[in-house]
Image: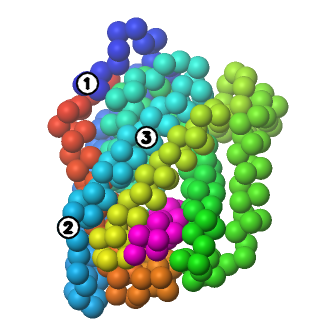
Amino acid sequence: MTSADPPDLAPDPPDPMRGAAGPLARVRRALRPVMVVVAVLFIGLAARDLARRWESGEAIEVRPAFVALSLLPLAAGAVVLGLAWARLLEELTGRAIPRWPAIALHVESQAARYIPGKVGVPLIRMLGAPRIGTTSAVVGSSFAVELVSFVAVGAIVGLGLLAAGGEQVAGAIAFIGRWSLPVLLALGALLVALMTVDRARAPARLRKLLAAEGRGPLMPAGLPLLHAAYWLTWAAHGACAALAVGAPPGAALGGSGLFVLAPIVGFLALATPGGIGVREALLSVGLAPAVGPAAALGAAVISRATSLAVDVGGWLLTRLLCGRAPPR
């Protein structure tokens, strides 16, 4: 696997971030290690917060086999999410995007979500745009479209799983509130609009902002399906995390929707790196009526620790396998 473009790929389109003058290219190369250092710093803070939360909780019996099992869906989900992004880029550009370099760049950017404000995620992708044969402008617009599907589909999957959980997660449903149906309808309508309305009919200013040339919908029909598959991996991860702290199977499956909603709420909490604290609070409060407060906190901490391990491990793996693209 290599981060170089395939031989049959068309020449790179012009990118405003890399011109003949060269200073912007040097800035791009200088920013990458800075972003990595900042991400590592906040990952360390997240790890310290996990240790503090675990020590302050009541003693619970943890089943290591389920903890290890909870890692597998997260790893699979990282690949699915990268594939979804590559598919979206192909729709926006009308050209082939190298799959593994795109997945590697996507995984690398995910580690940057521990930077407050979440600015590291789109910035890392924009800086790496030349590695996958596209421009920073297209990558930036792809992030906006991806975010809509990512959040909307996640909310639909999470709330749907909770609704199917029945009495096992009645407390969680009460905690979420009665606004779930209107939210589902609104998000569904937005997704349908993005998958059906021709981009050529959008206002010229919006098309320019999104670098949306050509015709066709902004969002490929397969993107929400891939995002649904991604969020189901989080549901499987959540069920394993709950089983790891002794939750009954019914409660573990019924509460799996909370492990879908919690990362979304954490991501939307822009001030907190990686949603630290916000995600754990939602999981702890939502799961407590079904499994007890100690087990709920334990499941939340296990979920954070394993997702952190996958983020860091995925980043290290892509660095080892793909290396760095040569400067352009």
Q: In the rendered image, which quarter contains the N terminus?
A: top left
Q: Is residue 287 magenta?
A: no
Q: CA distance from mark 1 to mark 3?
A: 19 Å
Q: Which mark is residue 49?
A: none
Label 3 crowd bin: few (<14), some (14–19), many (20+), radius 10 Å: many
Tell me if residue 326 can be seen: no
SS at circle 1: loop
Q: Which residues are magenta?
A: 248-265
Residue 264 in the magenta stretch? The answer is yes
Confirm whether residue 320 shows in the render: yes
Q: Are marks 1 and 2 in contact (CB under 8 Å)?
A: no
Which mark identifies residue 80?
3
- Residue 16 drawn at (x, y percent): 50, 30
Nearest-to-viewer mark from 2 and 3: 2
The residue indicated by pointer 1 is 2
Q: Which mark is residue 64?
A: 2
Q: Give the amino acid at mark 1.
A: Thr
Do tag 1 and tag 3 residues touch (Cβ < 8 Å)?
Answer: no
Q: Amino acid at mark 3?
A: Val
Up/down of 198 relative to 13, above or below: below
Labels 1, 3: front one: 3
Q: Quadrant of residue 160?
A: bottom right
Please name the residue shown 70% across and 45% down the image: 191
Q: Quadrant of residue 248?
A: bottom left
**Image quarter (top left, top right, bottom left or bottom right) of the C terminus:** top left
Q: Earlier in the sequence, mark 1 or mark 3?
A: 1
State the image quarter where residue 39 is shown: bottom left
Horizontal arrangement in the rendering, residue 141 relative to residue 104 (left or right): right
Q: Nearer the viewer, residue 117 or 160?
A: 160
**Mark 2 Cα shell of 10 Å, populated few (<14), some (14-19), many (≥20):** few
